[in-house]
């Protein structure tokens, strides 16, 4: 009886040890600590600190995008008060247009929207419609506030403010992901996720290039300054 119990215990111990050895062998590239406490055997891996590092780095990059795009939106007014007059209506229209771009900045879903089907044209249309609706009440008092001006204004902002910062953010993330993948201590499961994020940002870069090269952005953004110049000439007549 004792022999049978001892044999059974020995078999169980051997199986358990074999199982643990198999686990640790598979995890050895990411195990940082193994220790025994009152709560039992505890194994710590490199995943947790890496995940915190990823969250912190991505948050910093996204915060920089929001800040820079917000500053860029501030520097480009829909209507130039020096050319059309600094009236109450002009200042309100500019404020409403700025709020639309400011909301888009802090939503910070530009790349995801661009990555959808027909995302480029839909993104442009959404911003144009939002500003047109926000400023519609003042159109009868500001003749120069029309669809052509709004469309060129949105395209100018996308090309000169949004696109450069989005592209820079994607490049920073891709560089960061490549540095992570070069580490041998990261687990295979996390490595697969990082690779997926890297691939996604590479795809985002293609969408950003597509946005910049679209006829709408290329042509309409270039006439923004021309329209404002024409407004100045008409105002001086």
Image (tube, helix red, strand yellow):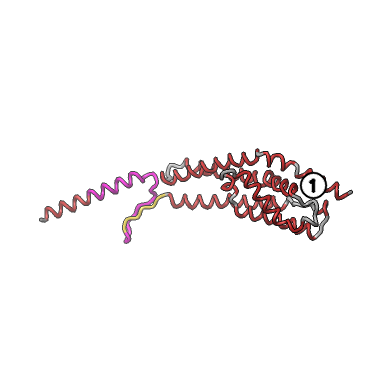
Q: In this view, does 103 lie to the left or right of 184?
A: right
**Magenta part of the chain:** 14-39
Q: Is residue 111 left or right of residue 153?
A: left
The image shows residue 221, relative to residue 92, as above or below, that is above
Foreground residue among 187 and 108: 108
The image shows residue 106, relative to residue 160, as above or below, that is below
Please name the residue shown 19% across and 50% down the image.
11
Foreground residue among 143 and 73: 143
Secondary structure of the residue carrying numbered label 1: helix
Q: Which x, y percent locates residue 188?
A: 41, 44
Please name the residue shown 62% across and 50% down the image.
65
Residue at numbered disc 1? 228
Q: Is residue 30 magenta?
A: yes
Q: Is residue 212 left or right of residue 50?
A: right
Q: Which x, y percent locates residue 209?
A: 62, 39
Q: Determine the image quadrant of residue 119.
A: top right
């Amino acid at each position: 009886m004792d022999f049978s119990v001892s044999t059974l215990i020995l078999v169980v111990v051997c199986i358990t040890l074999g199982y643990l050895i198999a686990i640790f062998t598979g995890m050895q590239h990411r195990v940082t600590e193994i220790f025994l406490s009152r709560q039992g055997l505890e194994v710590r891996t490199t995943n947790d600190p890496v995940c915190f590092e990823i969250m912190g780095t991505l948050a910093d990059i996204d915060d920089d995008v929001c800040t820079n795009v917000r500053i860029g939106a501030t520097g480009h007014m829909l209507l130039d008060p020096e050319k059309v007059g600094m009236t109450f209506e002009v200042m309100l229209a500019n404020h409403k247009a700025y709020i639309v771009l400011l909301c888009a900045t802090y939503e910070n879903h530009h790349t995801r929207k661009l990555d959808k089907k027909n995302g480029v044209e839909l993104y442009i249309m959404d911003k144009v419609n939002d500003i047109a609706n926000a400023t519609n009440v003042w159109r009868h008092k500001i003749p120069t506030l029309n669809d052509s001006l709004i469309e060129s204004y949105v395209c100018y902002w996308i090309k000169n403010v949004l696109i450069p910062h989005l592209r820079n953010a994607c490049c920073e993330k891709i560089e960061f992901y490549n540095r992570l993948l070069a580490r041998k201590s990261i687990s295979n499961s996390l490595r697969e996720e990082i690779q997926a994020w890297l691939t996604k940002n590479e795809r985002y870069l293609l969408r950003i290039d597509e946005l910049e090269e679209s006829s709408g952005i290329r042509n309409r953004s270039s006439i923004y300054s021309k329209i404002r110049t024409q407004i100045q000439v008409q105002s001086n007549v």
